Image (cartoon, rainbow, N blue to C red):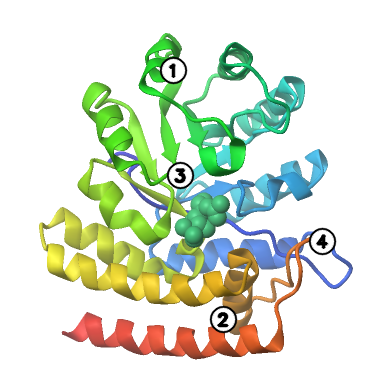
Amino acid sequence: MNKFKGAFAALLTPYDSLGNINHRVLKEQVRWLIGQGIDGFYVCGSTGEAFLLSPDERKAELESVCEANNGEKTVIAHVGEIATEHAVELARHAERLNVDAISSISPFYYKFSKEEIMTYYGELMESVDLPFFIYNFPKLSGFSITLDILEEMRKYTQLAGVKFTDSDFYLLERMKRAYPELCVWNGYDEMLLCGLSMGADGGVGSTYNVLCPAIKGILSNFEKGNMQKAQEYQHLVNDMITVMSKCGNVFSAIKTILTFEGMDFGGCRKPFHALSQEDVENIEHAYNVYLKSLEKMKTS
Ligand code: MN9
């Protein structure tokens, strides 16, 4: 079994009433997701509010996840930062924790040249002895990984794949076609089935934290060639994502559902806004409908 195939939850960061990371809830979440059938964890990515955390908080978060996971599922540490040195420091820390892989968004905010970004990735890959996944998220990073870039980066044996958060599925297909040995993860949960159809090996997603059984339903039915059933699961997922997206902040919406499930995640760090009471009620209603539909689908 390839440990990089399947469904990986982009973990969220829970906070206590003082605004500090709530490690107890974080560990509970890891165990709960293992019970739900998750294949692994993507730690301190966009969903984990990486850029709203201090480097020490990111390290502590990864330590708690590894402790709760206890070597059972795949752990991928997102170590992306603007400064190469900072990312390298996080990568070395992740290596000491024996994670399965590291991953990084391209350095952002400043308009770094392609060469600067390639040097960043090269130095990061060479700093540790771990498989590496490029985090391609052009909409937020402003930088898109192309086939030429992949070709250049293949000189690093650490390069293991791409987390592909984009809806250019033609590019995803071209990547898998040219480099079948690279693992490509679909990044937009609402389009998981498109990504799989074009060759993705699985997905990393924020909504996997609360919709894991439906996500696994998409993956397993796709694998069996049962497209109709896979589509039905994608509809279930998307009905939820539509409601969650209306809240403005999907992460707070997911945290709200986890709080319904008994894990008090708090909100997101400021400047993110808290959800309105109306948003919370809409999410509660949609989640109850989702749970009922899921039960029905399991028995149909
Ligand atoms: O990690 C997530 N990306 C971002 C992937 O949120 C930036 C996705 O899981 C989305 O949250 C999800 C909802 O749009 O597809």
Say if 201 sits above or below 68 in the image: above
First reached walking from the N terminus: tag 4 or tag 3: 3
Q: Where is residue 43 in the image (x, y as percent from the top left)?
A: 59, 47
| Residue of label 3 | 165
Cβ of disc 3 within 8 Å of ligand 1? yes
Q: Distance between the residues labelled 4 and 1?
A: 35 Å
- Viewer-nearest residue: 18 or 68: 18
Residue sitting at x 46%, y 27%: 145
Question: How many numbered tags mark residues here?
Answer: 4
Residue sitting at x 53%, y 64%: 31
| Residue of label 2 | 261
Residue sitting at x 66%, y 62%: 26
Q: SS of the residue at dot 3? A: loop
204 with respect to 77 (left or right): left
The answer to whether residue 295 of the structure is visible from this angle is: yes
Q: Residue 111 carries which label?
A: none
Type of amino acid under label 2: Glu
Say if 270 sits above or below 64 in the image: below
The answer to whether residue 10 of the structure is visible from this angle is: no
First reached walking from the N terminus: tag 2 or tag 3: 3
* Figure quadrant of residue 143: top right
Dot 4 alpha-carbon crowd within 10 angstroms: few under 14, some 14 to 19, many 20 or more: few
| Residue of label 1 | 149
Q: SS of the residue at dot 4? A: loop
Type of amino acid under label 1: Ile
| Residue of label 4 | 270
Type of amino acid under label 4: Lys
Q: How far apart are marks 1 and 3 (CA)?
A: 16 Å
Cβ of disc 4 within 8 Å of ligand 1? no
**Residue projecting furthest to the right:** 18
